[in-house]
Image (tube, coloured by chain):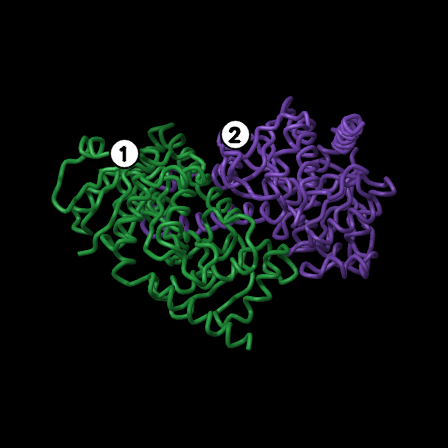
Chain colours: A purple, B green
């Protein structure tokens, strides 16, 4: 059975909701778990014990701590202990809802990067109107990228779409302010010129709407832009929920309408609820690492553990490593 | 009465929908109009004539034409003729749904920039959950900005919020990938350091969600990022409408639910329908110019004309010019 390390001290609702997610995951027989963090705090929330092991750590990374400070001072934290367990091959994957900058830092520091990846990147999965999934990479903290970084994100996204989503020829696009080649900024234009020669199914520039309309499988951007796209979407989902709640509670007629459309609203909230997706894989580090939303509840953690188990079973990281090596060989051949 | 020049050849549905919008505007007694474009084409759609004048032009800018080519070769286009009428003070404002890059170019070329503005910017208005309005600037084509450009966008947005929205101390933020000062990219960090000393109500970094949740009045970003934020929002609105249509038509029960909630859905589609907002002002050029969405229908054009009339009556441009001059004086004083 797959074994997964779970950082129980990371996340806005840690350790309570994190432990609750762990319990759901073992109850659903998804994986064996190693919980890292303050043993007493964890045990105060823990009802079951079968399939769960606790590795005590006295320190933990705060949610708003500077990642660089955490990297220097918190090597014995619950977060880094989880990565150390993965490095030692005691577990098959790590799940954390903690400070995502620190998680990226510790993942790189403890697990190491692939030779061919300068900057590991967070890939987020998004539902499309035609019930498909699109991948936005980087959704993480890689601001101020160079073209080579975006090209590497594209290749990792391509490998991910192939091995996890089972898409034979993923359509890979660069997120831009218009589809025409004349659009874009300096970064996207330079990246666009390289992408044409990478031998992947590159479809050129795509727009913000293409994250949701199914026009692309992999959408590449720097982490600054990716974060803004994500947060705009999250903000709209929140505003929408507030709007519906307010209107529906206003009259009996509206409440009746809601009852009749309940299934539709439930499907919608499932589609827009990030806890359904669990978390986002960090690609380019030597080990499977799922980074969850800081606001993750038990369900999100349970689903992130499921995601980690699936990726471990499918050998996601080997497939990315192989793909990256393949491109390196091609590029070396080109250079000659 | 305010007189407005309307480029009838710009927009995906030109000239039909543009002329329809013009008719609605004169019927609603909003303004007198000068329609620029192919006279025969315009007349074939035009039912009324009172309050409407036609200025014939043989050429027009194509929607996907390169703005720089248009600027060289299409000075006699319907679009530029509208700007020339404004320059000559024959009209008080220009409305166009044409190629927005070309519109920016001709506005700058024909009307001229304010001395204190290096790059005019498009400001879009967004509804917030608390029934307020936020301003996103630049939503246009200013990619690869420098800090000085973002600072100028902030000052123009501030002046706009004061004079048009009537907000005494607009809360001005920079769009970033997190609220903490440690976040942001090179551009936002440098801008952040300048913004603190500008004497405006600067609230620091804001996130994508803050465009809709009412936490800020003016949100500043470069045009690449602004476009992606806009298009993500548009994409979600479109996906949502498709989702509702599909689900509601599926069963009688759902149709009944929809009938009961009809007012709520109508309010929602009004909130997410850009044609309600009409268009977006281009700030920093010497004249009032409203740039509309390429997909504008008659209603959007009618509302854009209303917007242009309102700004003309309130002396929007004088107030921006005065504000910019004020800051220039402050800055010169500081330099001494």
- Image x and y of residue A135, in percent: 61, 35
Residue beneath the point at 53% across and 59% down: B174
- Left or right: where B39 falls relative to A174: left
Separation (CA) of disc 2 from disc 1: 38 Å
User: From the viewer's perspective, is residue B308 above or below residue B237?
Assistant: below
- Image x and y of residue A311, in percent: 72, 33
Q: Which residue is mark 1?
A: B58
Mark 2 vs mark 1, foreground winner is 1
In-front residue for pair B188/B62: B62
Q: Subunit of mark 2? A: A
Q: Count numbered badges in the picture.
A: 2
Image quadrant in which you'd find residue A265: top left
User: From the viewer's perspective, is residue A222 above or below residue B146?
Assistant: above
Mark 1 nearby-residue class (10 Å; few <14, some 14–19, many ≥20): few
Q: Which residue is mark 2?
A: A215
Q: Is residue A138 visible?
A: yes
Kindly identify which numbered label has been placed on residue B300.
none
- Image x and y of residue A318, in percent: 79, 31
């Amino acid at each position: 059975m797959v074994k997964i390390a779970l950082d129980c001290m990371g996340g806005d609702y840690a350790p309570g909701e994190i432990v609750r997610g762990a319990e759901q995951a073992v109850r659903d027989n998804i994986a064996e778990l190693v919980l890292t963090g303050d043993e007493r705090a964890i045990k105060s929330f823990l009802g079951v014990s079968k399939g769960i092991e606790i590795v005590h750590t006295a320190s933990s990374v705060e949610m708003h701590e500077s990642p660089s400070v955490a990297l220097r001072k918190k090597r014995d934290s619950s977060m880094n202990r989880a990565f150390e367990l993965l490095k030692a091959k005691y577990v098959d994957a790590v799940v954390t809802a903690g400070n995502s900058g620190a998680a990226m830092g510790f993942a790189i520091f403890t697990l190491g990067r692939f030779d061919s990846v300068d900057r590991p990147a967070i890939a987020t999965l998004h539902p499309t109107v035609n019930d498909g999934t699109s991948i936005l990479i980087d959704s993480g903290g890689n601001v101020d990228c160079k073209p080579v970084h975006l090209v590497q994100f594209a290749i990792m996204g391509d490998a991910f779409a192939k091995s996890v989503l089972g898409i034979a020829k993923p359509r890979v696009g660069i997120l831009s302010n218009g589809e025409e080649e004349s659009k874009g900024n300096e970064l996207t234009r330079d990246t666009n010129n390289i992408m044409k020669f990478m031998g992947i199914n590159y479809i050129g520039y795509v727009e913000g709407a293409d994250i949701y309309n199914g026009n692309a499988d992999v959408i590449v951007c720097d982490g600054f832009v990716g974060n803004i796209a994500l947060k705009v979407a999250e903000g709209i989902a929140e505003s929408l929920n507030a709007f519906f709640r307010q209107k529906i509670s206003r009259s009996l007629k509206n409440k009746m309408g809601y009852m009749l459309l309940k299934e539709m609203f439930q499907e919608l909230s499932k589609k827009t609820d990030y806890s359904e997706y669990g978390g986002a894989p960090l690609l380019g580090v030597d080990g499977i690492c799922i980074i969850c939303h800081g606001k993750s509840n038990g369900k999100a953690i349970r689903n992130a553990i499921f995601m980690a188990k699936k990726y471990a079973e499918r050998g996601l990281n080997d497939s990315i490593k192989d793909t990256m090596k393949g491109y390196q060989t091609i590029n070396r051949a080109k250079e000659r």
